Amino acid sequence: MKAAVLDMPTTAATECPLASARAPLGARPLISVVTPSYNQGRFIERCIQSVLAQDYAPFEHIVVDNCSTDQTLDVLRRYPHVTWVSEPDRGQSDALNKAIRRARGEIIAWINADDCYEPGAFDLVARELRRGTGTLVLLGRIHVVDPDGRILNTTTPFFEDHEYLVDVWSHDHGLSQPGMFFRREVLQRVGLFDPRLHYAMDYDFWLRLTQHFPIRVIDAVLARFVVHPESKTGQARYFSGFGREAERVSRRYWGSPLTRRHWRLARACNRSAADALLREILNAHKSGHRVRWKLVAELLYRRPLALGNRHVLAVLGEQLGGLRVWGALRSLVGGRAPRRLPAAPAAPVTSGRVTVVIPTYNRAAWVTRAIQSVLHQTAAQYCDIVVVDDGSTDDTRAALQTYAGRVRYLYQPNAGVSAARNTGLCVRPNEFVAFLDSDDQWHPTKIARQLDTLQRYPEAVFVACHGGRRAANGAEWSPALPDVPYGRPVDLAPFLFDGLFLLTSGVMVRAGHLPRAGPFCTSLKMCEDYLLWLRLACRGPAIVLDERLVTCGWDAPASLAADLRRVREAQLRSRYLARRELLRRPDCAAAWRAGLARMLAMHRDVAEREGAHGLAARAAFRSLMVAPRGRDRWEWGRLLCTLLPQNWGQPRISHRSA
């Protein structure tokens, strides 16, 4: 595409209406903020206010609206300093071009109506892009946030040169449109946005820009990028979205097909496209939709070997031959159908109530404390408590007599904590189920907070909360949580394949999902909760509350967690059992391998400390074989040192995280 050259005006910049209330302008350049808009009434006021909140003048804000039908125009009329027009256009690129033609500033900033700027961004940009510095294009970091403003992550942009940006398939450049500012001279050389592009107009602009100008990256957060389902980012898919247009734009710079560079870029592009097509095919099956056969045909064209993926074969078998072929293919690849919960008594499900399952064994003094924490809940009127005595030989039954009428007591021969929880699940057919170990306690608002969250997000399968641990000597600490988006439904499966971080006593589940996920695994004495949370997470989104609403006690007698050797063995076995769920979530295979490799590396370190050098060597070898890629050279050297008997007696080097 030959870019159109702007006919830039030569008139001097004038002050904005707010400039007279500030200090003398001096040599401050005029910053023009351009914003395309269409039906973003719920966000555009926050965008306008973020520009107003900058401690900077002069500036101008130009909004080009595509005849919005929501409250956008009412918001724009409330801000007289905004220059705006509402008329039909040919898309976002056309709206941007209209706004830029109206702009008079030395510095141009493009921000969409659903994004906003961080305080102080304009002052920093004006200093970095002032005349005489030689910098024409500036790029900063951005916060990626949800519609409520909660930070999901922060980008770390990186730019090397134009060639690095052309090969977008091999790495993530991290360039982000809200964090980019450039001087007007750039447009005179590069031109406007391509109106034929719907998704990749910014990528096309960057490629043309970097042919002539370098990008200076600064370590400062300049803007916030909002992710929501109505945005183009939230709606786009590979087949008709960013991937298609980005490939078409990038191909303009690949050069002749006779060069090695062209075919290197083509291979990288086909690998990326094949991964995207695989995800679309598997996600369509997971959502219960029919597979679009044009995706399969393109996958066959781009990377035929990808169709040998066993998960794709199983999906295609179901689409072609129905459930009978699907079952045969699953048996061939080693899949097993999850076991079902025993049939519950024929009773109507009580909506809005919570069944609280408390398993106990020889903990008469502790189980009463756990029950009291339930009875002291602010939402205790919604709780039905079921205590399952797993063959206790102390005075547990007598201790629970004082709660007659408020607690349902069940006794069974000793079969383990998993069997006790499964028994409790079949007693009260309520809408929600919460789990509480007999040596744990709840914060008084725990049930109320989780009920409110599940009722606000009906698509969530379960909700979990943060908690602390209490040792026998009274010391308390809180385990670290991974970087999970808190307070909203998210896909927890990748995080759980990587490792367990949920507390059993902090989870509340919608009971309707439990029969499909299967009961607690009775073959495991520990870590059985990990498998159930993972199965549930593979069936729908979940929510994690970053609130400490549970206290887990490690001071009870005969605690399962006291035997560290058995804990490590159960953790390792549960990781191997979790592999079955990869049939449902093949996209999480890398997370599963990384978590298993880290667990094996921990076993290696423990075995070395205990002097079991043969066991340490086996664990080190298995860890590196599970995830050989991306491991440090130090890890391979550690394996060699472990395998050499003459080094077994030498002092060990300091530990590093695997």
Image: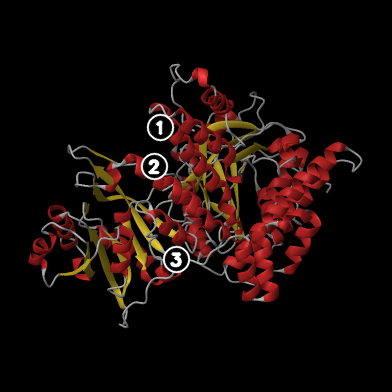
- Which numbered marker is on residue 564? none
Q: Tags 2 and 3 in contact by the CB under 8 Å rule?
A: no
Can you identify the residue that label 2 sits on?
Answer: 568
Relative to 261, 531 lies left or right: left
Query: Which callout, 1 or 2, points at the residue further toward the start of the chain?
Result: 2
Relative to 532, 198 lies left or right: right
Could you say which is closer to the camera, residue 168 or residue 14?
A: 168
Q: Tags 1 and 2 in contact by the CB under 8 Å rule?
A: yes
Q: Position of residue 182 (x, y in %)?
A: 65, 37
Q: How is the image coloured?
A: secondary structure
Could you say which is closer to the camera, residue 587 or residue 177?
A: 587
Residue drawn 37% across the image and 73% down it: 342
Q: Is residue 488 above or below residue 129?
A: below
- Type of the residue with mark 3: Ala
Q: Is residue 14 above or below residue 231?
A: above
Q: Tags 3 and 1 in contact by the CB under 8 Å rule?
A: no
Q: Is residue 539 above or below residue 440?
A: below
* The quadrant where residue 132 appears: top right
Characterize the local packing of mark 1: few (<14), some (14-19) or many (20 or more) Cα atoms within 10 angstroms. Answer: some
